[in-house]
Amino acid sequence: MNYPTAEIFSQGEEVVTGQVTDTNAAWLSQELVQMGFVVSRHTAVGDKLADLIGLLGDISERADLCICTGGLGPTVDDLTAEAVAQAFSKPLKLDETALEQIEHYFACRNRKMAEINRKQAYLPKGVVRIDNAWGTAPGFALQYKKCWFVFVPGVPTEMKHLFNEHIKTDLKARFKLQLDILITIKTVGIGESELQQKLNDFELPDSVQLSFRASTDEVQTKLLFPANSDAIERKQCINQLADVIGDSVYAIDESGKPKTNLVSVINQLMNDNSYTLSVIETASCGLISSKCIALDGLQQSHYVQRLNLLLTELNVAKLDDLTKVAVAISKKIKQQYNTDMVLVQLYSGDKKQFEDKERCITLYNVLLTPHGVYQNDCTVSGPLTRKQNHAAIRALDLLRRVLQNKCL
Amino acid sequence: MNYPTAEIFSQGEEVVTGQVTDTNAAWLSQELVQMGFVVSRHTAVGDKLADLIGLLGDISERADLCICTGGLGPTVDDLTAEAVAQAFSKPLKLDETALEQIEHYFACRNRKMAEINRKQAYLPKGVVRIDNAWGTAPGFALQYKKCWFVFVPGVPTEMKHLFNEHIKTDLKARFKLQLDILITIKTVGIGESELQQKLNDFELPDSVQLSFRASTDEVQTKLLFPANSDAIERKQCINQLADVIGDSVYAIDESGKPKTNLVSVINQLMNDNSYTLSVIETASCGLISSKCIALDGLQQSHYVQRLNLLLTELNVAKLDDLTKVAVAISKKIKQQYNTDMVLVQLYSGDKKQFEDKERCITLYNVLLTPHGVYQNDCTVSGPLTRKQNHAAIRALDLLRRVLQNKCL
């Protein structure tokens, strides 16, 4: 089947000049994708009438659906209704019901309606009005050429309210929609290109779309299965692919089901066993702890700028082998706080090296558990905050791997 | 004079499907507006080659400058270079220097370059390469018809780095720009509407544009002065406005000069006196420390989930008055670590209350200094991570106010 295509069109100088980030476009796109639309384009323009008219004309020949946000306010730079009137030859006309609603909105708030708000009751002739109880601007919708256009205010709360209360239901009735299944395989400790290399020879059914997404914390492998794909075959395919990737996979999410992240996975595994945890941070400077605010078992954490301070405090000998030092520290912390696990992060390199974006530092992570000591080490590079973040993620990933592989 | 027009073009399925919010477009637009460009349009498309080619052609006839983010990665869905090659008839060609840089990138990290990364060294013929020390994808730039196109990776850290290090200087040389002067008055501890209220009666010259921008950490009041405005009058106006706002103002930035943030301001003030600092965190769960990675004077910090654990450890009596408890803790920490200052954050409310987005918690911050003890308390609300962030900001703001008001 063909999926209907959708575009998002945002109007406002504050968007094109970057004074606000256009979160509406991302929010609407997610909603539409989940409903079964293919979102093909976002466009934002300012308050130039010619730009608006041209863009409306282009979209009317390109997309099956267009959601337009912004430009419905009372002021002179709110030009959307005027642009629609001109682009689609539907002159503006006073909508008496809209006017009553706007007057009512102000009356309810014991405020006098300003004369300029009358403008918001003028809608292009023949459109379907979308009532807005949350603000003064009604939305409206119309068909032009192949495209169903829906116009809503740009204020995120009003826009979301109108979408959830009115537009979603209408779109489901208006379009023939079929919902694909999106699987997200989440990995830590493997790069995007290494991941793709591993999957190079993996044969996916032609109907399945593969894509990757790398962020600072993780890499996601995304598989989009058709709505009518067989559940058992789908599961087999996902498991085989996850096996190829190996134990960098920390979670597999499915669209419509709750989303996981590294900390939520660790939290689940720790809570299953009521484990408690202490953390010693150096390179991550509090970021392990900060990421773990929703980790019930984190009892306490400690950051020290200089290792010597910690060694003196705990009466631990200084050695060249930082893994051995970390193990000694973990045992002292275990004595002091008696948590089930102790995660210790040390690094080699001085402050200058740490702050220099051209230089690397080496991390030594140790996890003390009731059943033994586990460790990893790795090199992190880049600017200070990038090193900090990788340091936190790699330490948490040691904890995740030990918990997930049931080494405990 | 005419201002050159610019467009932002973002490539990526993750953007059009709404999986990520396109913060690059807003960031770049702000930078370009501050340089003297008029940003007229943002467009985001996915990984459909035909869409990319069509869009590049349209922009080449519309804008003087286009910054394109994304689609330069090693994987099959990274199509930007291919689209440029086809749209502008500039076939892809191996750039030996780019290949060496990519190989060097991996060699530095002791990793083998995957074969697919070779793809990133193929650039459209005749372009200007933009070296990228932060990642594997070089950027590139070229003139086509009326438009100067600049292509950069979509990873925000890499994109910003390339823009700041290379592209900005090049654009200043390439375009005749007239620079308005943007003043950003940065405040912490005051809300956007309270700020607007305070400034309601402030009379600005007609030529000055006023706007506000609220983020989770701070509220910025922005004043855009014409390039030819008088420096002395400008300074008077800024100072008068800052006086009206009061001591919530922690910094005043000017476009083209180094940018400050709350931690950089604190760092400067602490370094002027070689002050050292210890921190005790509760509600912020490591986030104070994490935000302070560039704060030279932060010697150590400690997070505890349960206050009782800390009280026992330090042998401090439990009292109903949490400010008094915090003062007692700060004195013990001072004894133990001998830092010039000790910042202690406590909060009232149990774990359930903390995690419930409908409920508030009250924070009690205490700062022990060689010249006395300072404190503030405040209420924070909202979801867990919002409470965490506000808790960190309010504690840091106590430190900033004490340092800035020279109470020490």
Image (cartoon, coloured by chain):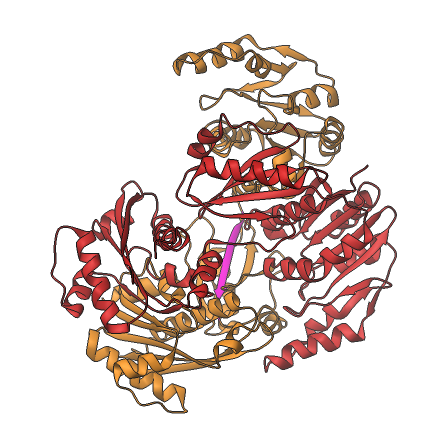
Chain colours: A orange, B red
Comparing A58 with B248, the one in front is B248
Q: Position of residue A405 (x, y in %)?
A: 36, 75
Q: Residue at x 64, y 53 (%)?
A: B12
Above or below residue B367? Residue A158 is: above
Relative horizontal placement of residue A115, taking residue A343 as reference (left or right)? right
Quarter in which the C terminus of chain A is drawn: bottom left
Q: Quadrant of residue A22?
A: top right
Relative to the observer, which residue lies in front, B369 or A362? B369
Position above or below: A332 against A172: below
The residues colored magenta run A180-188
Whether residue A274 is situated above or below residue B367 in the rendered picture: below
Q: Main secondary structure of the magenta part?
A: strand
Relative image position of residue A104 (x, y in whole percent): 44, 12
Measuring from the top left, give residue B88's x and y in whole percent: 86, 54
- A222 to the left or right of B273: right
Residue in the foreground of this view, choosing between A179 and A43: A43
Quarter of the image for the N terminus of chain A: give it: top right
